[in-house]
Image (cartoon, helix red, strand yellow):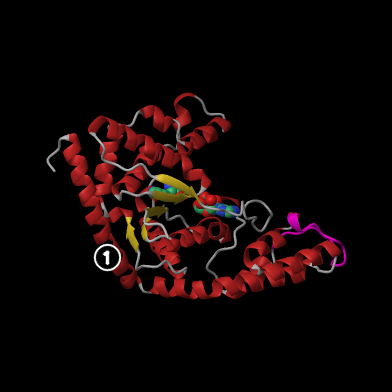
Amino acid sequence: MSQKRVLTGVKPTGTVHLGNYVGAIKPAVKLINDARDCFLFVADYHALNAVRDAKELKESSYSVAATYLAFGIDLDKTVFYRQSDIPQIFELATILAAVTPKGLMNRSHAYKAMIDKNTAAGKTGSELDDGVNMGLYTYPILMAADILIAQSDIVPVGKDQIQHIEMTRDMAGSFNHLFGETFKLPEFQVQESAGAIPGLDGQKMSKSYNNIIPLFETNKRRQKLIMKIVTDSKLPEEPKDPESSTIYQLYTQFGTEAEIAEMKKAFEQGGMGYGDAKKLLAEAVNRELEGPTELYNEWLENRAKLDELLDAGAETARAVAKDTIRDVRKAIGVKA
Ligand code: ADP
Ligand code: TRP
């Protein structure tokens, strides 16, 4: 087990689905529980760039917290908190902004994606910045502050976030160069992911495509959705290619090895209809998610307890953050 400090943040955004679970939540919980010293936080101020509804931000923040608790993060070695409870993060973001060239932000994927979207919509000139607020534009600075405030060593992230860790290293390196060794340079650790999980229509499962199977549902509702997965019209006795079947692809994430092998064989040999395969899939998914769903609902009904846990985590995180910001203030010449 590593002694290194592992830190990761989760942006609260709407309904979580099976794709988020397989691609992000499950691998993160494993990494967190394999580490000895862990910081995990709800990145609520990152969500603010896109959310304009107080109730929505509040609800999805609780939901993220309940999700990680439902999947059993070990609170004995995990400091679990809300970003918004650590004011030193925002002070550090201001300081980092002073040593960050604007050009670095211009290269950020999140910002560039918005420019690409506007370009595709036929916009030109200053309209290219439509929909870009300064929070989105400087997102990598806030993220660097999240990471550096806790003196993190390792940051587990999805592939899409690697660039942000590289930018964090750039900012920490510039600061150290200008003001003396203050920050450790964190490393990213890419979460192993099974690739994109398909949704009901066979495209990548995503909130934006309206094709999701929500993570926390009743067994009945989950089964109902699974029965809606789009298939071709092959008859049960016709051989089918498992690799191009959404049902089989999902089954590889939830079935046991033996069950997966069995479905593969049945598909290839033409011994299974889609209806039966969907039933097997629903059983496997429900088996894995029934327990966590119950826990999730219990946590959501007990918000006072959730607040208590997050407040306690914030206290520990603030103690670390205060030490960091004291060193940073000293380094730059502000009264520490
Ligand atoms: P959505 O596409 O529904 O908006 P997000 O972009 O909020 O999902 O994704 C949050 C996390 O879940 C990311 O780390 C992403 O890699 C992972 N993820 C999302 N959809 C899938 C999917 N279909 N398969 C695997 N991982 C996914
Ligand atoms: N940007 C990350 C995401 O969208 C969330 C995040 C915010 C984060 N701050 C972080 C992840 C710090 C790792 C470390 O998924």
Q: Quadrant of the C terminus?
A: top left
Q: Position of residue 297 (x, y in %)?
A: 45, 73
Q: Nearer the viewer, residue 128 or 302?
A: 302
Q: Nearer the viewer, residue 210 or 176?
A: 176
Image check: 74 left or right of 109?
left
Element type where label 1 sits in the image: helix
Q: Position of residue 275 (x, y in %)?
A: 76, 69
The relative height of residue 322 versus residue 266 in the rendered view (above or below) is above
Other residues around mark 1 within 10 Å, as few (<14) / some (14–19) / many (≥20)? some
Q: Is residue 264 visible?
A: yes
- 149 within the magenta span: no
Callout count: 1
Q: Give the magenta-colored segment's residue range.
A: 229-243
Three-letter code for the amino acid on which mark 1 is drawn: Ala
Q: Quadrant of the N terminus?
A: bottom left
Tag 1 residue: 312
Q: Residue at x 69, y 64 (%)?
A: 228
Q: Residue furthest left?
A: 335
Q: Nearer the viewer, residue 301 or 312?
A: 312
Image check: 247 left or right of 137?
right
Q: Position of residue 264 (x, y in %)?
A: 76, 63
The relative height of residue 257 versus residue 156 in the rendered view (above or below) is below
Q: Position of residue 131 (x, y in %)?
A: 44, 38
Q: Is residue 207 visible?
A: no
Q: Residue at x 69, y 54 (%)?
A: 202
